[in-house]
């Protein structure tokens, strides 16, 4: 397990315009070639947070996954973010693509009912941990951040990635929860949100953060500004802190069950 360079891309998104967003993001990522290990894009980075999946959804064989593979190979880095995917219904799917073309995915578990997301998308039921460059990575999507049991570190991950379209009126909750998840799980947390206004008139302040295992911000920026920032995750510091302050050993045991009582976690 070596140090990991991670780049956060906080940007406006063109409403339901996949090709336009892919072009913008490719331009923002281009200077990162050979300079980073992992690039994190926002939730629904090709469309914004839309409840019109019938208009914008792609199959897994669609253009955005092909684009992600191309970008990862060009950059020499993994690229990730969530996309509207059609797969036995519509999914808000987190895609993680490595330079060699390997694809991992996670379907958002907690659908944001205040925007009726649960009426348009199918919830995932698999808690995914991705291994990359010796790091164990837990992907999460936006509203998942509010559910600490689902996010609980069972000594099975080192870095949590949370991609989001989290509106400005709730920015305090976003920032606070990112710090809380890092502290309680003794892990690094990267939260990547968008900026600008979406097609429904909602404003987004961004507030993307890279936080260490003590809840200290490693990357931050004034609200509302687009940026591309890269930080380094120190593997030795993480391991040493967990050794010196082993709170994880006193965590309560529990299971997570579906509505039918089938244990899926």
Image (tube, rainbow, N blue to C red):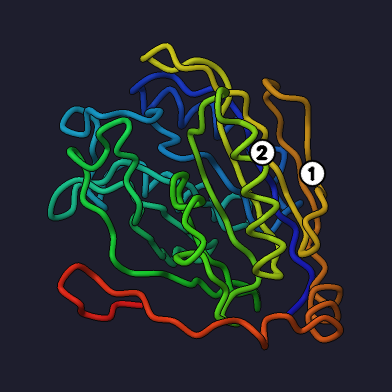
Q: Quadrant of residue 173?
A: top right
Q: In this image, 221 relative to 194: left or right? A: right
Give SS at disc 2.
loop
Q: Residue at x 59, y 27 (%)?
A: 11
Residue with the mark numbered 2: 208
Label placed on residue 259: none
Residue with the mark numbered 1: 219
The x, y position of residue 14, in whole percent, is: 44, 19
Determine whether 184 is above or below 224 in the image.
below
Determine whether 69 is above or below 51 in the image.
below
Q: In this image, 95 relative to 221: left or right? A: left
Query: Looking at the image, do the residues carrying marks 1 and 2 touch, with CB atoms under 8 Å apart?
Result: yes
The x, y position of residue 229, in whole percent, is: 75, 40
Give the camera-side residue of 153 and 135.
153
Q: Quadrant of residue 32?
A: top right
Q: Residue at x 36, y 43 (%)?
A: 83
């Amino acid at each position: 397990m070596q140090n990991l360079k991670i780049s956060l891309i906080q940007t406006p998104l063109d409403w339901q315009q996949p090709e336009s967003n892919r072009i913008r993001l490719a331009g923002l990522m281009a200077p990162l070639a050979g300079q980073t290990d992992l690039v994190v894009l926002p939730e629904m980075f090709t469309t914004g947070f839309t409840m019109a999946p019938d208009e914008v959804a792609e199959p897994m064989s669609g253009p955005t996954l092909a684009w992600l593979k191309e970008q990862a190979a060009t950059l020499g880095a993994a690229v990730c973010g969530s996309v509207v995917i059609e797969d036995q219904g519509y999914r808000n799917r987190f895609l993680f693509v490595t330079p060699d073309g390997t694809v991992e995915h996670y379907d958002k578990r907690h659908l944001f009912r205040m925007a009726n997301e649960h009426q348009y998308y199918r919830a995932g039921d698999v808690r995914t941990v991705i291994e990359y460059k010796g790091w164990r990575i837990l992907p999460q999507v936006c509203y998942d951040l509010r559910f600490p049991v689902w996010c609980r570190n069972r000594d099975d991950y080192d870095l949590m990635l949370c991609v989001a379209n989290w509106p400005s009126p709730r920015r305090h909750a976003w920032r606070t929860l990112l710090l809380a998840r890092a502290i309680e799980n003794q892990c690094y947390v990267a939260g990547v949100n968008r900026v600008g206004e979406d097609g429904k008139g909602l404003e987004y302040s961004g507030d993307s953060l890279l936080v260490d295992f003590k809840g200290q911000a490693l990357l931050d920026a004034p609200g509302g500004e687009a940026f591309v920032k890269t930080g380094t995750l120190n593997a030795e510091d993480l391991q040493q802190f967990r050794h010196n302050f082993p709170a994880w050993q006193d965590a309560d045991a529990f299971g997570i069950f579906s509505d039918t009582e089938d244990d899926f976690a």
